[in-house]
Image: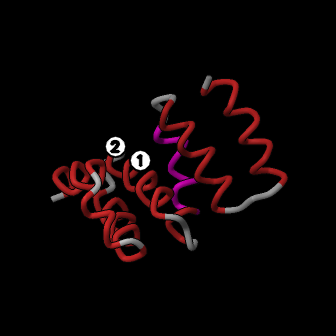
């Protein structure tokens, strides 16, 4: 359950603030339909080396917030890290919204 996971993830981020725990907290907020609260966590992801999935999570949140510049930057980072990400359905859908 995302509500239960949020308190655990937030505690983990407080104890070990990293882009991995930031992605977890931010993605849980997104799942709870609270992208504004996810923003600061996804900004950490975007500013740090991250996995392809983490960058796609950030792009998703920024697209929901209509922050097209950051959404595009996150997708670009995902595709730079893993060019095959261009073929993912979620990446294609985000690109269609951002353009």
| Placement of 33 over or under 96, stated as above or below | above
Name the residue at 25% across, 59% down. 87
Q: Residues within 10 Å of mark 1 (few under 14, many from 20)?
A: many
Which label sits on residue 42? none
Residue for point 56% across, 53% down: 40
Residue 37 picture location, percent across and down: 55, 41
Label 1, on which residue?
61
Q: Quadrant of the N terminus?
A: top right
Q: Which residues are magenta?
A: 35-44
Does residue 81 appear left or right of residue 32 in this picture? left
Our reading of the magenta stretch's main secondary structure is helix
- The local crowd at label 2, few if under 14, some if 14 to 19, many if 20 or more residues have their Cα within 10 Å, is some
Q: Residue at x 32, y 73 (%)?
A: 83
Q: Is residue 20 magenta?
A: no
Q: Which residue is mark 2?
A: 64
- Side of 22 where 51 appears, left or right: left
Q: Based on the displayed image, in which of its 4 quarters is residue 10 positioned? A: top right
Query: Between marks 1 and 2, how big is the CA–CA gap?
Result: 5 Å
């Amino acid at each position: 359950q995302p509500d239960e996971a949020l308190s655990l993830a937030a505690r983990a981020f407080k104890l070990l603030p990293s882009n991995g725990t930031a992605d977890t907290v931010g993605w849980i907020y997104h799942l709870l339909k609270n992208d504004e609260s996810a923003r600061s966590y996804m900004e950490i992801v975007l500013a740090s080396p991250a996995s392809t999935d983490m960058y796609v999570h950030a792009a998703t949140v920024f697209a929901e917030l209509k922050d097209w510049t950051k959404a595009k930057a996150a997708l670009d980072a995902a595709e730079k890290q893993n060019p095959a990400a261009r073929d993912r359905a979620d990446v294609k859908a985000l690109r269609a919204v951002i353009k």
